Amino acid sequence: MKALVLIAPALLALAGCATVQPWEKGKLAKPEMTFGGDKLETRYTDHITTSREAASGGAGVGGGGCGCN
Amino acid sequence: MSARTTRVLRMAVVLAAALEASGASALDKGAAAPAFDLPGKDGAVQLAKYQGKLVYVDFWASWCGPCRQSFPWMNEMQAKYGARGLQVVGVNLDAKTDDARRFLAETPARFAIAFDPAGATPRAYGVKGMPSSVLIGPDGKVLYEHAGFKEADRAELEQVIKKALGGAQ
């Protein structure tokens, strides 16, 4: 019983491991799989980060934390 | 640690090792190149049909940037050394063959093109990266393997082809 408790999560974790072959990485090679693959989306995300988290700088978008710019 | 826990851990390690081992391993130099018979752009492409020729098998996909770079070079090699017995074979590995056809429409290939959407051939050849190429001698044995394609590789690969052709004649 104890062994089962130990093995079951291990098996579940292993089920998540799939060997992706080099020739099966077509989807990973798409531009939307990269950071900043879409310019508009990147700018939008920057804006949200800047205004909501008051984390400005480093991305070229200014903001004051009020969510209005 | 109790004996039981140790046993369970050992089982987990064995299982993980078994999963790891399922990956294919690359071919050794001098090993017989695995045969293939695939549908191609202009009819079936069989490795056996090129016996007696120096065959440059290139594994490529439409989404792979360096593959696109290698096409003009492969065209050049086929044009330059085709008469001396070189046959370039591009094995496409796109899951959707239509993607490959679209690629070929904008990047012309003047050598044999085969389609292997299931990926059985790269598995047999133990392809480790994209693109990968294997140079197969007239006797059907692996002479040289190469992964990736950079501008700097052009000269080196051409040297290998030249040397192999020199030996074949």
Image (cartoon, rainbow, N blue to C red):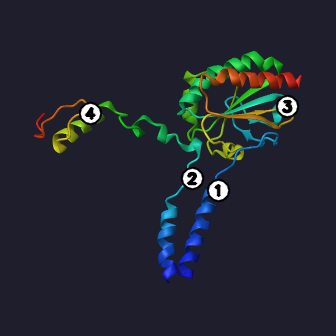
Residue furthest front as drawn: B1
Chain identifier of the residue bearing label 2 in the image: A
How far apart, in angstroms, are the residues tagged by discs 2 and 1?
8 Å
Name the residue that disc number 4 marks. A58
Q: Amino acid at mark 4?
A: Gly
Real-space Cα distance between discs 4 and 1? 44 Å
Q: Residue furthest top?
A: B80
Q: Chain of mark 1?
A: B
For mark 4, name the chain: A
Q: Position of residue A39 (x, y in %)?
A: 32, 30
Percent position (x, y) of residue A32? 40, 37
Q: Residue at x 82, y 40 (%)?
A: B30
Q: Which residue is mark 1?
A: B22
Which callout, 4 or 1, points to the residue nearer the camera? 4
Mark 3 touching mark 4, by CB under 8 A? Answer: no
Q: Which of B100/B127 is in front?
A: B127
The quadrant in which residue B39 appears is top right
Q: Which residue is mark 3?
A: B138
Please give the residue where the numbered disc 2 appears in the rendered image. Answer: A19
The C terminus of chain A, quarter of image = top left
